[in-house]
Amino acid sequence: MLSAYRALLYLYPREFRREFGDDMVALLREQRADEGTARVAGRLVLDLVTTVPSSHLEAHMSRASAPTLAVVLVALAVVFAVVGGPFGLVVAVAALAVATVTWRRSQPIVADASGGRWWKFLAGGVGLLVTLIVVTTITGELPEGGWFVAMTAMFTSFALIATGIVLGIASRFRTA
């Protein structure tokens, strides 16, 4: 895994690799010793998807802006969703996911002692389910490949709703 990671580091700009490459490999080695390979690999892929584009933007700009990258990804998602058909919808969802992660990583880390984030999962799940119902009602029959996207969206909405309910109940019983 370390040799593959060293090869993936070539996705970063040269200056970034020179400055951080050895530290990144050492960190990966430590993480693999502490955690499972699958968990580290999942986090590694997410990190590569979000930091490689922003590091290239930093290399070409005097001041990098993760929120700007998120806005660009959202704009691309809208274009793909409108123009791309079923494949474009899948690309749009992926672009929105990367935009969300990029934006969230640019925000300062704050402790949420209130446990008040449960409703976001619940609202997101309900919103996704309502969107799915509206889209399938308007379009009628699903196009080729649309069934997979619809089922994925439905199961994702159920998972978000269940997560919101569980977190909401847990926040009510959390001791202060």
Image (cartoon, helix red, strand yellow):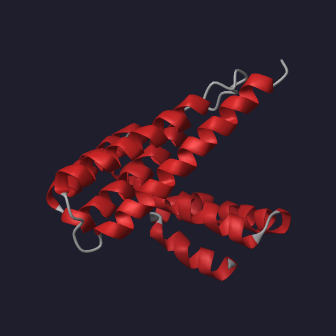
State the residue lying farthest toward the top.
176
Q: Position of residue 37 (x, y in %)?
A: 74, 72
Residue at the spot 39% in from the left edge and 58% down from the top edge: 94
Q: Quadrant of the N terminus?
A: bottom right
State the residue lying farthest toward the left.
83
**Does 77 sit left or right of 67 as displayed?**
left
Residues 16 and 81: in front is 81
Q: Position of residue 116 (x, y in %)?
A: 63, 24
**Does 34 sit left or right of 165 as displayed?**
right
Residue at the spot 18% in from the left edge and 56% down from the top edge: 139
Q: In which quarter of the image is residue 41?
A: bottom right
Residue at the spot 18% in from the left edge and 63% down from the top edge: 84
**Does 88 sit left or right of 13 as displayed?**
left
Residue at the spot 26% in from the left edge and 54% down from the top edge: 136
Q: Position of residue 99 (x, y in %)?
A: 40, 47
Q: In which quarter of the image is the C terminus?
A: top right
Residues 75 and 92: in front is 92
* Residue 155 appears anywhere in the view: yes
* Residue 64 appears anywhere in the view: no
Q: Position of residue 5 (x, y in %)?
A: 61, 74
Q: Is residue 140 above or below residue 115?
A: below
**Does 167 sit left or right of 85 as displayed?**
right
